[in-house]
Image (cartoon, helix red, strand yellow):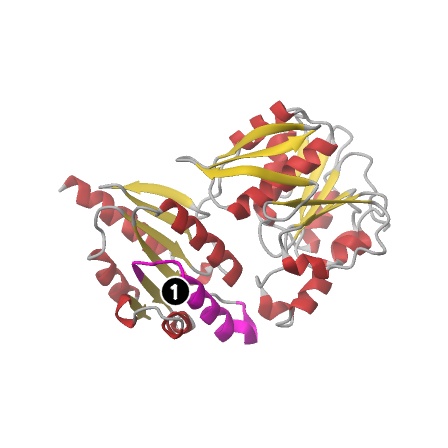
Amino acid sequence: MAPIIPKIPAIGVTGSAGKSTTTALIYYIFRTKWKHVLKTPGTKNLPKHTKENSEKIKPYHKAVILEMAAGHKHFRYIKPNFGVITNIGTAHYGRLGNSIKKTVRAKSGMIKYMNPNGTLLLNEDDKNSKLLSTKSFKGKLLTIGIKNRADYQTENLQYSKQGMTFNVRLNGKLESFFLPTFGEHNVINALFAIAIAHQLRFSPREIRTGLKKFKPRRRRLNVTSLPNRSLLLDDTFNANPQAVKAATDVLVKLGEDKKKIAVIGSMLELGKYSKRGHQEVGKYLAGKNMYRIFVYGKQAKEIKRGAINHGYPPENIFAYTSRKQLHKKLKSYLSSDTVFLIKGSSQMKMKETARFIKKYGLKAKKR
């Protein structure tokens, strides 16, 4: 069976992180103008799902947006005319050979097998994306970025109480946008959506409307207000070093005038990179003025080691393999003007800890 070569906009989204969010943001913008848009349901992004979704394309569809895990097999079924590679990081590192070069090869399928006359979008801020070989790509190459000069670049990026505000220059005019979630990494995801929509002649107003309708998925940087000016950041859907650092940056921003507490569970699927990856997170946390650090799980003990090795006070970091003991200790830190970040691989069930802090904190208000 030959792959489908769609005549409608067909967007393929791959990368180490941000695939689902980018896919959703594109969808919300497209829906401001088009009623029938086919999108990957949930996170079903394996080649078999691409096959199933490609077969669902009907004559009435105006666009299709497919989230794609690493690999070339997706392109046996469809050749997107827009290709997005969000970034190249350490997610699923163990599965991809414990090597950035091998991860780059796995993610390069988009460049090699998408519609050669289509549009490829890359992250100019991601140093590992510079390892991608684009020399043989004959279509249009566009870049997005916050820090580095790019075709679509933010200006005046700021945190607000409900999300992020920023400007992007479109058609020679500086346009303002609002994204109802937090983190520069999510603004990067939004830039991909903005760039694609702009290329398809969506108006700035339509793009603004679509972005405002975006709703973060459960357990992905969901912010809950706790009593006495405290906050809970529930980012427990999954974790890898890159994602933990991104979430830490949000913790730092939202906790500028508060006590910052990071509660990090083990990051799985890192293979031989596990020890080093956890220690890198410890080093990163050590440099971010954390009030306290809690780590949960066997592998997460290396976060403690990394933090202490880089100057973090040993008396301010606690390691547990018992969730009951973790919760008992955390209870004493549910005080005013505190921001909690809860994160870890899905299998570590850190959602239970987020639920504990939310439940106990709100219960404390009633007393």
Residue depicted at 63% across the width and 40% down the height: 153
Residue positioned 64% across, 71% down in the render: 99
> Which quadrant of the figure has residue 135?
bottom right
User: Crowding at label 1, few (<14), some or many (≥20) Cα neighbours within 10 Å?
Assistant: many
Task: Please report the bounds of the magenta region as a residue range.
Answer: 269-292
Whether 36 is among the magenta residues is no
Secondary structure under tag 1 reads helix
* Left or right: 85, with 249 as reference point: right
| 40 relative to 61 in the view: left or right | left
Q: Quadrant of the C terminus?
A: top left
Q: Nearer the viewer, residue 236 or 59?
A: 236
Tell me, yes or no, whether the highlighted magenta stretch contains residue 279: yes
Image location of residue 85, percent across then percent down: 68, 51
The residue at the point 48 percent across, 35 percent down is 180
| Residue beneath disc 1 | 286
Please, is residue 6 above or below residue 98 in the view? above
Q: Quadrant of residue 227?
A: top left
Query: Is 71 rendered above or below residue 21?
Result: below
Magenta residues: mostly which secondary structure?
helix
Residue closest to the eye, 72 or 247: 247
Looking at the image, can residue 255 be seen? Answer: yes
Residue pictured at 44% horizontal, 47% vertical: 221
| Residue 145 percent location from the top left of the image | 63, 46
